[in-house]
Every structure is written in structure tokens, then in C-alpha cells.
Amino acid sequence: MIDRTVRPRLLAALLVSLVIATLAASAPPRAEAADAQFVLTVLRTLRESYVDPLPPARMLNAALDSLEKQFNVQPFGGPIPDGATDAQAAALFTQRFDEIRSQLAARRSATELAFTAASGMLDSLHDSHTGFVPPDLYQEEKRREHGEAAFTGIGIVLLARDGQFYVNEVYPGGPASAAGVRAFDRVLAVDGKTTSGLTEETVSSMIRGPAGTKVLLTLGRPGEARPVEVAIVRGQITVPGVASKMLQGGIGYVRLYEFVPGAGRAFRDAILGLRHNGMRAAIVDLRGDPGGLVEELRDVAGALLPQGSPVLQMTTRGGRKMTLRTPDPPILPSSVPLAVLVDADTGSAAELLAAAVQEQARGIVTGTKTAGAVEISITVDLPEGAGMSVTVARVLSGKGVRLEGHGVTPDVQEALTTEGLNVGRDTQLDRALDVLRTTLGARSRPVDRPAHMGGAL
């Protein structure tokens, strides 16, 4: 039986009225291993929840196409006819799946075939918020959503640039931070093996490992003539929600990693703490932020934008339209200049926040164009520990701009350059600081006034 636990990835409170029917009565019994029935269960779930109607034949043909392309096989009988009924399409798919399974029985498991077919079927929609998630990644995602340790590793984010691998972020309190790893260190080797010529995925897998084990990083550090070797004991990694600090000149800096549970409250606490310490301008860093929960988006946006500001518009499967607005007055005064940093990995709720700041003319968005992955989805548990994400509503920005597939274009465009990384400079942050300092300087200069033409009136 499929577990119908629903965890909204973007909208929480607004989807209470969205009825998700249970499959308890109609779901097939759990098999010992995934097979054609697994794919049919995925399709049934998808058709019940997806925002648009989906013809079964087209979707199942996409599943078969993925098997043919991945494993270079072809079932007898050709594609499933478009006019097939649901029952006919299911029967024909099962027949063709079993034919492929028999051809590959000695080399591929039924579970691998089912996962490949399900993934191909969902990918055929070309929808940023609909997709199949294999068991290991899905369990990690669930832990992240609950604010738990998501994986074991050292607590860094890699940035691949021009064939080199830089430490783009060091999670506060993680093993890498404790060992002295710094942002913009270049990873030259892992356990003595050079990273030259490797993919980012390969380097990441080399760095990750069981908790309690050691990994040796050879780092090229800006300002250091020789490589630095750092031994790190891997541990359980919890992705942080918010980090903040005061930069020179009274400019407050808040990094929002994800819109995870509690991020909105932590963000507001950070803003209040910086204000207490004399913040004159603010930077909100959304780079690499994949988004998250709408109640957290609402709380963060409410801290920055005027009360009643529209943050997003949504249309559900049934055509119902809703607008999310900030509920309270902001805690960051409008007199405090604001800059928001974004990049190509800024997605979903983070994109909506950046768009709202632009649309309300509340601050300057700096960096590179965002991911363009803005829809509303739920995640659904599947057999075998796998999961799937399903788009249940279409989303526009607060003022009705389509961001899906387009992203947010910054007001001030600035890329991270290899030259800057090699000398330890965050060129995007530097540009945001320049913008804010210019604004602060303009506000502090005396205003030219006309000469008095007489006494006071």
C-alpha cells in the first residue's frame, strides 16, 4: 500500500483546502520488489494530484521510452495507442514491461527497471517540481524537511568552476568549520587523489562517507604559497537555516540556506539582533537556497516588505486562485537599504522572495539569474522507500509574473569569477556592498539648498 503522507514543499496552509484522495482502497498490494505495478501506482498517484490532466497512454509510453533509451531494448508491439482506455493502457504497459524485463533479467533487476521507467515518465513532463526521487535521496530530503541531520559528511558546499572545485560554503558548527576549512579554499585532492579531471558528483562522493571516518583534503588557499592539508572527521550534517553577522560599516548580513521549519523565526531574530547592534543597511543572501515551505516564506517576506504586499499568486488543479500576502508590518524599517544576493541555484520560495523585493521596490537584487523553478508541489511516499514530487498548483510572482522557466533577473548582474575565487574574493558580495555603501553615502551627503531670498515667512 502506498503511504499517502503529504508534505507540501512550497505551500502548507494554503493547500489545506486541496483535497487529496487516498489510494488505500485501490492501491495494489506491496510487492517484494518494484515491477510494472510500481510504475502504474506512480501514474495513478500522479493523475490524482497533478495540476493538469494527464493521458495514461502518453505517460506510459514515456516510461517505456526511458527503458528503451537507457538499456537499448525494445518491446514487441510498438507504443501504446493514444485511444487506449485506462485498463487497456495498464495491461499493454505491463506486457511490454515484462518483455523488457525478460530480455534484461540477467543484467538488471526489476526494481532498477521500475525506477528508471517511473523517473522517465515523470521527467517527460519537463516540470521543475515533478519528479521521481530514489530511496537514498528521498530519505535525505525527508530528514532535511524536518530539520534533522540529512547526511554524513563534513559540512561544505562545493562550487565547480573551470574544472576546479572550490569550497563555496562552510556550514557553521560542522566538521569542516571545526577543522579550519575556509570559503574559497580550492579542493586539490581528496585522500591523496587529485580532483583534476573529475566531475563534481565524483568529488562530492569522495568527500562524503560514514560518520566517524576521516577524510584528508588538500586545499589551495588564497594567500598561501603551498597547499594546506586538513584532516576532517566526518559527522552527521544538519543543513542550517539562517546565519548572520555584522560587516564593516554597519551592514548586516543574513544568509538564508533553506526555508526549513523555523527559518522564518530565525530570520526575524537575526534581523532584530542586527538592528540592536546598529545595522545601517542589510544584505540577505539567497544564493544556493532551493526554497522550501510557504509559511517560512511568508514570515521572511513579512519581515522585509510592507504589510499586505503580494508574495505569490497560485492556481490549483481545480482552477481556484489565491494570493499570499504579508500579514504584518515589517521589522526592517524602509529607511534601511536592502540588497538581496541570488544565483543560478536560487529556487522556488527563494526566487519568489527575490521577485517580491523587486516588485515592491524594497531593495536591489544582485547576482545572476535564478533557477526558474517555481511551482507548488507535494511529496508522496512510494514503496521501496522511494518518493515523488508532484506539482499541484501553478505559481506566479506577487504581481503575476511567470517565473517558472524564466527565473528572476537581478537588478545588478554580477558573476563569481574564477579570478576572484582564486584570490578569495566574493565578487557578488563585494558588488552588493558597493551598492549599499553608495546608497548610504548618498544619504549622508548634505543636500544643496537654494539661497534664502528673505526672512522666514
Image (cartoon, rainbow, N blue to C red):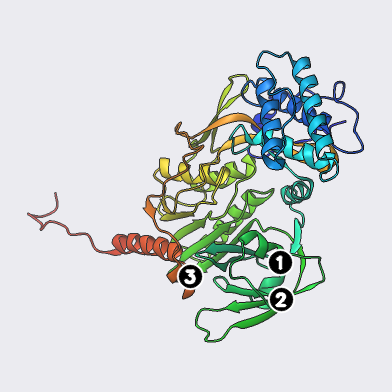
Q: CA distance from mark 3 to mark 1?
A: 22 Å
Residue 264 seen from this side: yes
Mark pair 2, 1: CA separation: 8 Å
- Residue at image mark 3: 421
Q: Residue at x 78, y 48 (%)?
A: 139
Crowding around mark 2 (Cα neighbors within 10 Å: few <14, some 14 to 19, many 20+) is some
Label 1: which residue?
206
Badge 2 or badge 3: first in the primary sequence: 2
| Residue 379 visible from this viewpoint | no
Instruction: Using the image as rendered, state which of residue 5 and residue 231 is in the foreground.
Output: 231
Res 191 label:
2
Secondary structure category for the residue under label 1: helix
- The amino acid beneath tag 3 is Leu
Instruction: Point out the tag, 3 or 1, that comes first from the N-terminus.
Output: 1
| Crowding at mark 3 (Cα within 10 Å: few <14, some 14-19, many 20+) | many
SS at mark 2? loop
Residue 359 position, x and y percent, is 41, 40
Which sits earlier in the primary sequence, circle 2 or circle 1?
2
The percent position of residue 236, horizontal first and vertical second, equals 78, 63
Residue type, label 2: Asp
